[in-house]
Amino acid sequence: MSTTSGTVVERFASSLRHGAGASDHTVRAYVGDVEALAAFLGLDDDSTWTDVALADLRAWLARQAADGKTRTTLARRGASVRAFFAWAHRVGIVEHNPAARLASAKASVTLPHILDVDEASRLLDTAELHAQSGTAIDVRDWAMAELLYATGIRVGELAGVNVGDVDMNERTVRVLGKGDKERVVPFGVPAQRALTSWLENARSQLAGDTAALFVGHRGSRVDQRQVREVIHRLASGAGVPDIAPHALRHSAATHLLEGGSDLRSVQEVLGHASLATTQRYTHVTADRLRHAYELAHPRA
């Protein structure tokens, strides 16, 4: 793509970042999708964006479907180009929006592996056992795992939490979610105990001049990669299925619903903009209920 066309994409990225408050991850994904579309259509200057038709967009998505891309990927890429052309039409880069009638692929509702309650307990008990006889890093890992499961927050939200965001008396944590939306999420006594151990006994051994709640060996704020490595390592040590931090979020949501929490409350905890996103967890709980029924009922 030429510099001129690249400038359009850069302007789009800026509008996402500053106008819509999109996360860096979302900006990278949307920009990558638009650049992939440009490469597919052979666009090399600003004027060619005006020549893009709905059939071109459908052909691009059809090619990816033929290449085996998942419905979730196709849905996101469709959303990317719809957002791009809506913006391009609004700022006058294109006269007509070719993506206005682009159908949205239905994203898969497949969720990552979800730990059952016993597996989650084993993972957290393992983390606590390591913390009792280990280093400051082990105490940190225990606190991170407990807070992830207790609150269902995203790994990026966890990494962004500051010490001042935690209210130990109320047992709540303030996080900044997608679209720079702030919410306050409660946590329980086990997470409070782990956080107290980290803040009072271990954090000072590592923390430099930073407000970050969780820090690494060199005293700087942990990043998402470090958190993922911690959860993978704890899962291995606990003998539970290998999971990523996001699976703890899904596990927490599922266990809340199984325990009787209503969808609206779970939506608030998870920070979902739409209740439809939260409703996917009802499929998991319904499946588990049917499985238990078929195992237990004499006339199942």
Image (cartoon, helix red, strand yellow):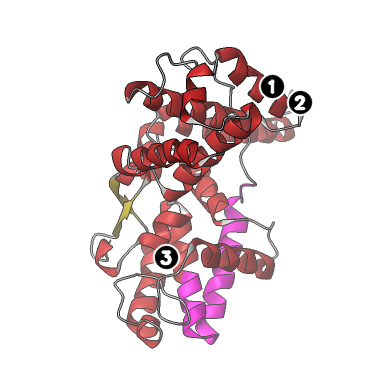
* Residue beneath disc 3: 190
The span from disc 3 to disc 1 (Cα, nearest Å) is 49 Å
For badge 3, the amino acid type reads Pro
Magenta segment range?
Answer: 113-142
For badge 2, the amino acid type reads Ala
Within 10 angstroms of label 2, few (less than 14), some, or many (20 or more) residues? few
Give residue 242's position: percent from left, percent from top: 68, 58
Give residue 75's position: percent from left, percent from top: 57, 28
Q: Is residue 275 above or below residue 223?
A: above
Q: Nearer the viewer, residue 57 or 187?
A: 57
Q: Is residue 14 above or below residue 51?
A: below
Is residue 81 shown in magenta? Answer: no
Q: Is residue 201 above or below residue 157?
A: below
Residue, x 33% and y 37% (percent of image)?
20
3 or 2: mark nearer the eye: 2
* Residue beneath disc 2: 66
Mark positioned earlier in the residue sequence (3 or 1): 1
Q: Nearer the viewer, residue 163 or 267?
A: 163
From the viewer's perspective, tell me whether residue 165 is left or right of residue 12.
left
Residue, x 36% and y 44% (percent of image)?
17
Mark positioned earlier in the residue sequence (3 or 2): 2
For badge 1, the amino acid type reads Ala
From the viewer's perspective, tell me whether residue 250 is left or right of residue 220.
right
Q: Are marks 2 and 1 in contact (CB under 8 Å)?
A: yes
* Residue beneath disc 1: 62
Q: Are marks 3 and 2 in contact (CB under 8 Å)?
A: no
The span from disc 3 to disc 2 (Cα, nearest Å) is 48 Å
Within 10 angstroms of label 3, few (less than 14), some, or many (20 or more) residues? some
The span from disc 2 to disc 1 (Cα, nearest Å) is 6 Å
Give residue 100's position: percent from left, percent from top: 46, 15
Give residue 179's position: percent from left, percent from top: 34, 42
